[in-house]
Image (cartoon, rainbow, N blue to C red):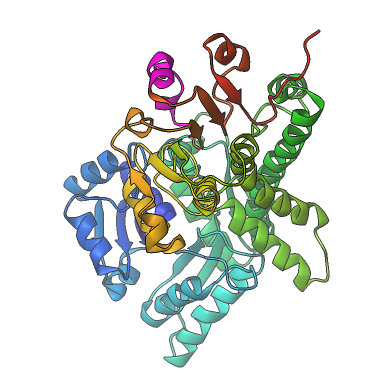
């Protein structure tokens, strides 16, 4: 099938590359010439395991092309996927300017039937606005071409996006019952047939329900994280082990084990933005989503907890103190620094007068860029970007772990102990067991694992 992907960011590039991998003829459009040049020269603008190889393979096979030519992109695909960014606006709502700009461009150039697929995460009612934008452009030039707007939200986890796309647990598609909608249904069914051979993974519904499903899913996952983080903070006070609690409640099939890990708070491009956008949508309908307001407030506070543990141990005045930090990206297997808890921690330590040495397996370049926006030149001068995890440890009072990279799970504890000034670890992701750390001679501070008593 001939497919156009509008936007070569995280969602668009993964979607385009994976659809090409299945044998489709994919045209990827972006207005950023530097990004297109990078892709055409064999690079990719994001870190995602397995993606670079898929892009290279399908470019070589002629199934995947990248361009800034809007007219050519509209002419290419019967299926037009809109996969542009929807960043939060000042009031927390999703900014739809790029989605609507893409819709207008389709309307300006289309001359035959198109299925316009909203792949971006968008609020309920966006399909109506996309439809109106396309229709206005067609009317302006007297073109009677038919089209249908479909909602097909993505459910990709950063760091596992290729796997999630190629082996989805569900495919959500919203369409209407018009003749054009039924035609779109047939084309979307054909597109996703390869994913349904083992068993049916597609959930067909109306467009607004599909739009709502994406926000509801992310809001639920964010709620589980904040719920466990709040319980973890209480566990620290009462002397319970949040990991034991997690196993105890996760064994209930009504609850399950997923997304019950206590930690330093969630970040990234999805959960913070989507929770705020859903809250904003509710306010437009005079509804107050009390639970989601609490989820957001708990997460904001949770990002401070790790730094507060450091301050509680070393005092408010951290001048002359140096700390090692492992992990900068908001989660492993990505270089994404958006809303990353490490940004909050670093600012806390610098505000206390400390210096830090930091390391992340893939996010160092992006971290330098982002932290330079957060911090003053004087503050940046107190950050050393190390070349390896062990390179961070020299002269450090303690090690602080913020991101749960696999490379951090089984380190050389003897070397860590001999390198640090004091054998102290603050574990923001509960990678290690308190008993094991105690036996190894470490003072260990986890999240919800400060067990006061043993029976």
Residue sitting at 56 percent across and 75 percent down? 131
Residue 404 vertical position relative to residue 244 in the rendered view, above or below: below
* Front residue of this view, candidates 189 and 334: 334
Q: Which of the 4 image quadrants contains residue 428?
A: top right
Secondary structure mostly taken by the magenta-highlighted segment of the chain: helix
Q: Which of the 4 image quadrants contains residue 88?
A: bottom right
Magenta span of residues? 404-418
Q: Position of residue 194 (x, y in %)?
A: 44, 38
Residue 171 vertical position relative to residue 117 in the rendered view, above or below: above
Residue sitting at 46 percent across and 72 percent down? 98
Q: Position of residue 157 (x, y in %)?
A: 50, 42
Residue 415 sits inside the magenta stretch? yes
- The quadrant in which the C terminus is found is top right
Residue 442 sits inside the magenta stretch? no
* Front residue of this view, candidates 172 and 408: 408
In this image, 141 relative to 245: left or right? left
Q: Position of residue 161 (x, y in %)?
A: 44, 41
Residue sitting at 36 percent across and 61 percent down? 4
Q: Which of the 4 image quadrants contains residue 410?
A: top left
Residue 337 vertical position relative to residue 260 in the rendered view, above or below: below
Q: Is residue 390 visible?
A: yes
Q: Position of residue 35 (x, y in %)?
A: 27, 61
Q: Is residue 78 visible?
A: no
In this image, 80 relative to 57: left or right? right
* Front residue of this view, candidates 254 and 26: 254
Count numbered badges in the picture.
Answer: 0
* Front residue of this view, candidates 286 and 313: 313
In this image, 355 relative to 148: left or right? left
């Amino acid at each position: 099938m001939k497919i156009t992907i509008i936007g070569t960011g995280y969602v668009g590039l993964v979607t385009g590359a994976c659809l090409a991998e299945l044998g489709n003829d994919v045209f990827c459009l972006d207005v950023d010439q530097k990004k297109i040049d990078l892709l055409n020269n064999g690079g990719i603008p994001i870190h995602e395991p397995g993606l670079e190889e898929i892009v290279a393979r399908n470019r070589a096979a002629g199934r995947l092309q990248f361009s800034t030519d809007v007219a050519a992109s509209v002419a290419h695909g019967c299926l037009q996927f809109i996969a542009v960014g929807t960043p939060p606006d000042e009031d927390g709502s999703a900014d739809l300017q790029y989605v609507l700009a893409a819709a207008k461009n389709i309307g300006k150039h289309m001359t035959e039937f198109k299925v316009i697929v909203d792949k971006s995460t968008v609020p309920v009612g966006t399909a109506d606005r996309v439809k109106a934008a396309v229709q206005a452009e067609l009317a302006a030039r007297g073109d009677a071409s038919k089209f249908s707007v479909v909602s097909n939200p993505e459910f990709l986890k950063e760091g596992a996006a290729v796997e999630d796309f190629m082996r989805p647990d569900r495919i959500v598609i919203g369409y209407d019952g018009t003749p054009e909608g039924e035609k779109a249904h047939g084309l979307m069914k054909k597109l996703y047939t390869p994913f349904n051979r083992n068993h049916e993974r597609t959930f067909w519904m109306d467009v607004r329900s599909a739009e709502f499903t994406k926000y509801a899913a992310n809001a639920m996952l964010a709620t589980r994280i904040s719920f466990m983080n709040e319980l973890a903070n209480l566990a620290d006070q009462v002397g319970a082990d949040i990991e034991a609690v997690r196993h105890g409640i996760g064994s209930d099939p009504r609850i399950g084990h997923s997304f019950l890990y206590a930690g330093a708070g969630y970040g990234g491009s999805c959960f913070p933005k989507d929770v705020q956008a859903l809250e904003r949508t509710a306010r437009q309908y005079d509804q107050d989503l009390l639970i989601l307001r609490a989820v957001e407030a708990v997460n904001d506070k949770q990002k401070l907890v790790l730094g507060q543990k450091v301050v509680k141990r070393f005092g408010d005045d951290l001048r002359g103190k140096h700390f090692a930090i492992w992990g900068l990206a908001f989660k492993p297997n990505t270089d994404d620094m958006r809303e990353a808890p490490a940004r909050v921690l670093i600012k806390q330590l610098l505000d206390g007068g400390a210096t830090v040495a930091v390391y992340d397996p893939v996010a160092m370049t992006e971290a330098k860029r982002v932290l330079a926006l957060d911090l003053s030149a004087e503050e940046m001068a107190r950050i050393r970007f190390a070349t390896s995890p062990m390179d961070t440890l020299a002269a450090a009072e303690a090690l602080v772990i913020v991101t749960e990279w696999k490379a951090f799970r089984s380190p050389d504890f003897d070397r860590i102990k001999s390198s640090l000034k004091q054998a102290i670890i603050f574990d923001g992701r509960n990678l290690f067991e308190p008993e094991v750390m105690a036996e190894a001679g470490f003072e260990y501070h986890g999240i919800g694992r400060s067990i006061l008593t043993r029976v």
